[in-house]
Structure formats: C-alpha cells, structure tokens
Amino acid sequence: MNGILNINKPEGPTSFNIVSRVKKLTGEKRVGHAGTLDPAASGVLPVCLGSGTRVIEYLMEGAKDYRAEIEFGKTTDTYDAAGSITSLTDSSSVNRNQIETALNNFLGKIQQVPPIYSALKRKGKPYYELARAGIDVEIASRPVMIHNITVRDWKPPVVTIDVTCGKGTYIRSIAHDLGQIIGCGAHMKSLERRKYGPFSIDDAVSIDELERSCSGNFWQRYIHPIDSVLLHLKSIVVNDDIMQDIQHGRTFENNNISIQTFTDQSQPEEFQETRCRAYGLDGCFLGILRYVSETGQWKPEKVFI
C-alpha cells in the first residue's frame, strides 16, 4: 500500500510510537512520519507508507498551522509543561494588548534559537541527551518563517495563539521568547498541530479509528494518494513515448511534451524553472521531474510508475 495516512496523534506517545503502531496495524514494512510532534503535543501527523515515504522531503516544505496555549509567570527548562520549573514570576499585570504587540516581533523571517531539549543533533548526539547529562551546549539561532501569528483567546495567565509557520519552527521557543519580551517568563502549556500541508485536523484519523478499520479490513479508505502532497508543483501530461522515458529515468526535450498543464496559465515561463508532476494520458501519476535549464531537458527525479 502506497500513500499517506493523516493521523491525529494524541498527547502522550512519541511520533515514533505512532509509526510503530501503524506498522503493526497495517502490516506495512516501509512506514515513516513527516514532522515530529513532541510527546505532549497532539494533532496532524502525516504517516507515509510504501512509496509514500519517498515524498516526505517535499511534504516537509509545507506550511503548518498550530494552536498553542502559553502560560505566563512560569518558565521551564524544556520551554513546555513537561519540564522542570526554573522560575516563577508575578504575571498579573500582563494584558492582551501587551501580548498582541509583542507577537509582532515574531512575524516574517526571524532568527530563532531552538530549545536545548530538542531532537536536533550535535556530532550525532541529540541535544536533549546532552542537556540531561548536564553538558553545557550553546545552540546557534537559525532562520525560520512565521507567516501568521494571532491571539485566539486570553484567560489570564494563559493566552491561546494560532501560528502558521514554515519548517523548523519551534512553538516552544516562541512561548519562551514571548515571556522574555513581556518580562515575566512563560512556557508552552499545550500544543495542537491543526494543519500540515494539505492535511487538516478536521479529516485526520485517530489511532483508535485506524485500529477498528484494520480489524474490519477497510483501513485503506484513509489512504491519501502520493501526489496529494505535491499539488503545489505544476503538472504535465505526457504521451506514451515520454512515459517510457520517465519510467526508465531518461531525460527528454522540453518540446517533446505533448500536453502541458500549468498551475498559472498566465505565467508559463515559470514552468521551466523548477520541478513538476508528470501524469500519463490515463491520469496515472508517473513521478516528479526537474527541469535542467542548462540542457533544456526534463530529468526524472523520482519515478513512481
């Protein structure tokens, strides 16, 4: 079975635990997830099966929507509720206007320092292992993109925010940094990923639902096709001769494409600058092609036929 499951991960298990459970339930050997969720976090976790694991890198480029509860007046070493308390401060003077003003600091492309308790690695060792061993580690900041960040609810001392962001963003770091800006400290109380690329919490399947569907042998209904995570790429339809070229990994001339379908019909020149999806005349998804401008040819990058 090749495709992607949109799993609604509950609080508690790790993302790896969910992958192991899916393997056991479905009997599939090649299973992987895109975008780790911390054990305490819940929400959308795309789990890829079979050839679906080959598009994880493309899925990782997709935007993500989060809903987070941030509690002011308390900081922890992990920046979330699972950590040990490092400080307690009076937060009674914090108001919504302060919070909304402070959140403007996080919009756009920013430099963010990830939490020390994270799965990022230094010389092959996860930072959280170094932190637990008491080893002092300085983590460099890195660029992340915050597309949107807004206050959804404010019930002192807890604010609920909605965040749309790019890959590599730590919402825990936003919570910690927000507390530092306001001056009373803060930590992330809870986190739910509500959207990841094309997948939404509204149509995600729980592990319990998946288990019931596996018992009834109808779990395949929850599989999303591989190309569903590639719809941001332009597409082409090719004839049978070109399909053979793609199948065998052969490059071919741009003018040999019999039918071209552009995402933006007004700007077809952009079609020649990047990757695209390729389909046969019967609508079958063939693979991902990359345009090589130096040679004026299309090169099969990943073939699924």
Image: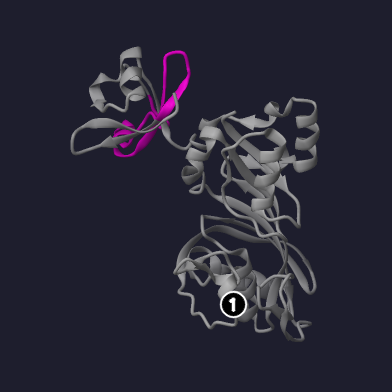
Return the x and y of residue 230 as percentages of the image width and height: 48, 36
Image-based side of 2 in relation to 17, left or right:
left
Question: Which residue does the numbered mark 1 point to in the structure image?
Answer: 131
> The disc labelled 1 sits on which kind of residue?
Ala
- Comparing 200 with 214, the one in front is 214
Label 1: few (<14), some (14–19) or many (≥20) C-alpha neighbours in 10 Å: some
Residue reaching furthest to the left: 295
Return the x and y of residue 35 as percentages of the image width and height: 57, 52
Return the x and y of residue 36 as percentages of the image width and height: 60, 54
Q: Is residue 82 above or below residue 238?
A: below
Span colored in magenta: 261-287
Q: Can residue 184 be seen in this snapshot? A: yes
- Residue 3 drawn in magenta: no
Return the x and y of residue 33 as percentages of the image width and height: 59, 46
Q: Quadrant of residue 106?
A: bottom right
Q: Can residue 115 be seen in this snapshot? A: no
Q: Is residue 252 above or below residue 67?
A: above
The residue that appears at 29% across and 32% down in the rendered structure is 299
